[in-house]
Image (cartoon, rainbow, N blue to C red):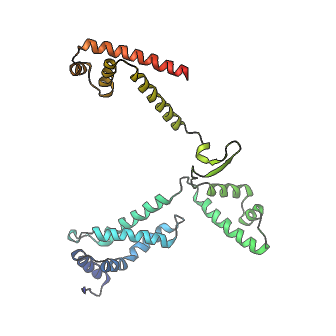
Amino acid sequence: MMYKVTNEPKNNSLELLRQYHQSPSTQKRNQLVQFNIGLVRKEVHHWLNQCSESYDDLLQVGCLGLIRAIERFDLSKGNAFSSFAVPYIRGEIQHYLRDKSPSVRIPRHWVSLNRQATKVTQTLHNQLERCPTKVEVAAAMNISPDELQEIELACCNRAPLSLDAPVSDEEKGRTSLGEMVPDQRYRSFQLAQEDCILLQQALAKLEAGTCKVLEFVFLHDLTQKETAERMGISSVTVSRRVKKGLATMKTLMNSADSID
């Protein structure tokens, strides 16, 4: 199916948008992307100097935002498509950069110096026909060797290291980083699990009626009156069994701890 367009790019885009929403097709959508690619390029150039991502990657991400704008644009509201599309393009790029950003942020000028150090190292390597020392690289950059080392360490360590990363241990041999890092939350979880086991063991040793009362009151969150009605006993009996059951469980659990 042929679609009619005028000679002006703006009118071409609006007419094609109208036709696309009446009869969507990949061909028309791609044509709309080509008509409005300038919006993406302008936004990409804005972000290019603020991150380490390549132009092509940002352009592709921006085009995804443009496609979302094409899909959601409502011609009946009379808004300019460019004003509508730019927030979608910018938002898509910002989300991408936020997801790609390192967990540890370092000063931007350090990132620039680290890139410069790489170029200087390569240049000196070609000139000296050997690998240059840190002192030589730092002198060529007019910074101190200590500052260069600090920058390189910061850039090297800004990426997170997996807890599954293999490391060598003198006692255990080869192990993972996660096994060598103490986790207090995991220790708390272990203690909670141990308490649950002791609680279940103590409950199993209680008289059946007392155990049932405790389940109704503490597990099912019933009042003592509701528990009495369900079990066909008096509220006084329920209260007595609760006190007796808790005292017995405390004794059983304390004795179990002392044995361990």
Question: Where is residue 165 drawn, in percent x and y?
Answer: 60, 52
Q: Relative to 182, is 144 on the left or the right?
A: right
Relative to residue 105, is residue 10 depicted above or below?
below
Question: Where is residue 27 drawn, in percent x and y?
Answer: 32, 80
Relative to residue 195, is residue 119 depicted above or below?
below
- Residue depicted at x 55% and y 20%: 259
Relative to residue 40, is residue 138 depicted above or below?
above
Q: Quadrant of the N terminus?
A: bottom left
Relative to residue 105, is residue 230 depicted above or below?
above
Question: Where is residue 103 drawn, in percent x and y?
Answer: 53, 53
Q: Relative to 208, is 191 on the left or the right?
A: right
- Residue depicted at x 43% and y 65%: 93
* Residue 145 vs residue 126, the one in the foreground: 126
* Residue 148 vs residue 206, the one in the foreground: 206
Which quadrant of the structure image shows residue 111? bottom right
Q: Quadrant of the C terminus?
A: top right
Which quadrant of the structure image shows residue 246? top left
Which quadrant of the structure image shows residue 82? bottom left
Q: Relative to 227, is 157 on the left or the right?
A: right
- Residue depicted at x 33% and y 16%: 242
Q: Relative to 68, is 187 on the left or the right?
A: right
Question: Where is residue 8 drawn, in percent x and y?
Answer: 30, 85
